[in-house]
Every structure is written in structure tokens, then in C-alpha cells.
């Protein structure tokens, strides 16, 4: 059975477990959790309760970390992490609020 190809923006939303991130980065899971706490890696909480305790690490942030810490890379590669584009809201109320904020200079 064939699966349809995923849209390119789906790649920006992929995430992996803390254990998989630790294995990929070659460090302990506590190091990955500390990098998440400090904001050096991007992650999300997952779970079905109102206080979810599962954590997934965004794949793009791991790739950016690897690029920033690569040996022999150019300075541009090291300093510029690759972030996915932000999604724009599709509803009119949001667009109107953004226009008001822009008019106020925010």
C-alpha cells in the first residue's frame, strides 16, 4: 500500500522523543532536557491531560543545533539556525487584530 507524499511544511512539524534526540546528539537525556529548558532546542509537551508531561523535540531544532556546532562549518552556517516559516492564521478576526497592531506600531 502506498502512502501519499507529505507536504513540505510537515517536515517543519516533525518531532522525536527525548531519548532519540539524545542518541542523535550523542549525549544523555538529561542534557537534552536541559537544552530544552534553556531554549537552545525547541520542543513540545504531549499528553491527554490538562498538564501533559511527555516531551518531544522538534527535528528542525536538532538539525539547527548540529549545524551550529559542526566542526569546519562556515561562520554563516554556525550562527544562523534554520527555522521553519511561521504559519499564518486563516481567520479574519486574527488578520484584523494584526492590522490594528501594525497601525499602533507594535
Image (cartoon, rainbow, N blue to C red):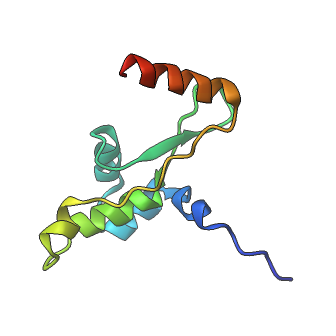
User: What residue sits 61% from the left and 61% below the top?
Assistant: 10
Q: Which x, y percent locates residue 45?
A: 53, 39
Q: Nearer the viewer, residue 11 or 86?
A: 86
Residue 69 visible, this orientation: no
Q: Residue furthest bottom?
A: 1
The image shows residue 87 at horizontal and vertical percentages of 56, 46
Residue beneath the point at 55% across and 59% down: 14
Residue 13: x percent and y percent?
Answer: 56, 55
User: How many numbered discs, if any?
Assistant: 0
For the N terminus, the image quarter is: bottom right
Q: Residue at x 51, y 19 (%)?
A: 100
- Residue 67 seen in render: yes
Relative to 1, is 79 above or below? above
Tell me if 7 is positioned left or right of 20 in this view: right
In the orientation shown, which residue stands out farthest toward the top?
104
Residue drawn 47% across and 54% down?
Answer: 58
- Residue 21 position by quadrant: bottom left
Position of 10 relative to 40 (above/below) = below
Q: Position of residue 22 (x, y in %)?
A: 37, 61
Horizontal arrangement in the rendering, residue 4 relative to residue 37 (left or right) = right
Amino acid at each position: 500500500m502506498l502512502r501519499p507524499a507529505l507536504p513540505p511544511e510537515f517536515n517543519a512539524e516533525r518531532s522525536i522523543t527525548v531519548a532519540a534526540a539524545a542518541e542523535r546528539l550523542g549525549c544523555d537525556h538529561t542534557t537534552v532536557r536541559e537544552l530544552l529548558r534553556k531554549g537552545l532546542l525547541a520542543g513540545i509537551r504531549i499528553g491527554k491531560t490538562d498538564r501533559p508531561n511527555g516531551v518531544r523535540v522538534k527535528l528542525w531544532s536538532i538539525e539547527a543545533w548540529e549545524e551550529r556546532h559542526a566542526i569546519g562549518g562556515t561562520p554563516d552556517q554556525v550562527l544562523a539556525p534554520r527555522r521553519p516559516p511561521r504559519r499564518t492564521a486563516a481567520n479574519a478576526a486574527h488578520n484584523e487584530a494584526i492590522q490594528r497592531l501594525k497601525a499602533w506600531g507594535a
